[in-house]
Image (spheres, helix red, strand yellow):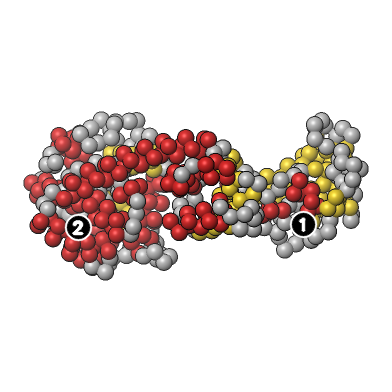
Amino acid sequence: MTFSPASFASQLPHLGSGIWWVALSGGLDSCVLLHALVYLDLPVQIRALHVNHQISPNANAWQQHCTDLCERLNVPFTAERVRVENRGRGIEDAAREERYRVFERHIGANDALLTAHHANDQAETLLLRLLRGTGPRGLAAMAQQRPLASGILHRPLLAFSRADLEVYAKAQGLSWVNDESNANDDYDRNYLRNQVMPLLSERWPSFPQKWQQTADLCAEYELLVGELADEDLSRAGITPELVGTSLSLKYLREISSVRRNNLIRAWLRKDQLSTPEQQHLDQIQRQLIDGRQDAEAQVAWGNLSMRVYRERIYALPLADLPSVPESPPALSSITELPSGFCLKMEPYDESETPLLKADLPNLHCRFRIGGERCKPVGRAHSQTLKRLLQEYGVAPWLRESLPLIYSGDDLVAVADLWVCEGYQADSAGYRLKYERISKSART
C-alpha cells in the first residue's frame, strides 16, 4: 500500500474523547507518523512522548530534535529520561521495558498510544520469532491494536514499508535522526535488517506484505483457539484460591493433549503468569496429570509453580505463597503475616460459625512444629492437627504457614478454619478471618 494522507487515515483508530500520544523517537518512522497526523488536522488532541534512554552519546541531541519538530508542528511535547539496566536479557529488551513503563504512566482512560512500527519491522519480528521456535500466537507478530494501561496501543503504519515512509518524508522536507547502534550487527534484529532482509527483497520484493498476510491469518487462528480456550476454562471450573487459581484435573484428562495445552496457556495468560514452553507442558502431563496424586510433585518455571491436590491442578504464583516468619508476630486486630497475608480478629455479636472468646488471657500466635492436637467445636474427639487439616482440605503448601492462636499453652483456634471446644463465645466474641492483603492496600 502506497503511503498517502488518505491511505494513512484509513489505518487510524476510531476517534475518541482521549489523547492520541505519539511515541516519538526522532527517527524517520515516528517523524513521519507525527507529521502525517498533524497534516490530517483531526478533531483529536495530539501529544508527542519521547523516552531518552541515555544509552547513546547522541541521546540528548535526539531529544532536542524531537523538541524542535514538535515546536514547528505546534504539538505538545513530553520527554522522560530513564535508566536502562541489562538484567540478563539484553540491553534492547531492558530499554523496551523502561520505554513501556513510561508509556503506561502517561496513557489514561480512552487515550491511545500510536507507535511507528511499519511493514519491515513486522517482517523482522515475524522472522525473529520463527527463528526462536514460536507458535501461531508468536507468528501473529505485532497486532495493529492491543490494550495498554487503561487505553490502547495502535500501530497505524504496519501496512506501509519503510521505503514508502522515506518517500513521504523527503517530499515533505522532513529531517530525522539515525541511531548509530542500528549498524551493529551483533544485535539479532540489526543482523536481519542489514544482512538478511536486503537479500530477501532482491528475490521477493513484496515479501513484507506477504508475511503480513501470514501474521493476519495466525492472528485469526489465535482468536479461534482463544474462543475454544474460554469455553474450556468455563467447563474446567476455574476457581480462585487463597493462593492462585485451580482447575479440574478430571476435565484436563478428558480432552486431547493439543486442546489441554491450549487451555493451560490461556489459563496462565489470564492470570498474568509465565506461560510454559513445550518441555514444561510435557512435565505437567507426565508428573501432574498422568502421575499418581502426590501433593509434593510440582512443575515450576519463571514466577510459577503448578501442583495438584484432590483432583485439582493449581497455578501458584511463587511470590504469593505464604511463608513462616522467623518469630511469631504479636496478635492485633489485623496481624500482618509474610507474603501479603493477614489474620483479622474482628469483634462480632452474632455468627453462624463459632466465635473465639474475647476474654481469653495471653493470646498469641504460633506456627506448626508437629504433634499439635485439638478438638474443633462440635467434634466428639480431639485429633491431630495434621489429620484435621487433611479433613478440611487445606492444601499442603499452605499448612505450615497457617497462624495458630494460643491462650497460654492451649491451642484455641486455627486461622479462620475452626475454634477449639471450650474456647468459643456464646454470643459476642472475635470473628477470625485469614486472607490475602489486597495489593492496593499494601501499596
**Residue drawn at 61 percent across, 51 percent down:** 308
In the image, 7 versus 22, the foreground residue is: 7
- Quarter where residue 81 is shown: bottom left
Amino acid at pointer 2: Val
Q: Residues within 10 Å of mark 1 (few under 14, many from 20)?
A: some
Which residue is label 1 attached to? 367
Amino acid at pointer 1: Phe
In the image, 282 versus 165, the foreground residue is: 282
**Disc with the residue nearer the chain's start (1 vs 2):** 2
In the image, 184 versus 197, the foreground residue is: 197
- Say above or below: 347 vs 122: above
- In the rendered view of the protein, which quadrant contains the N terminus? top left
In this view, the residue farthest toward the left is: 171
Please tell me whether mark 1 or mark 2 is closer to you in this view.
Answer: 1
Which residue is label 2 attached to? 177
* Rendered location of residue 93, percent (x, y): 36, 60
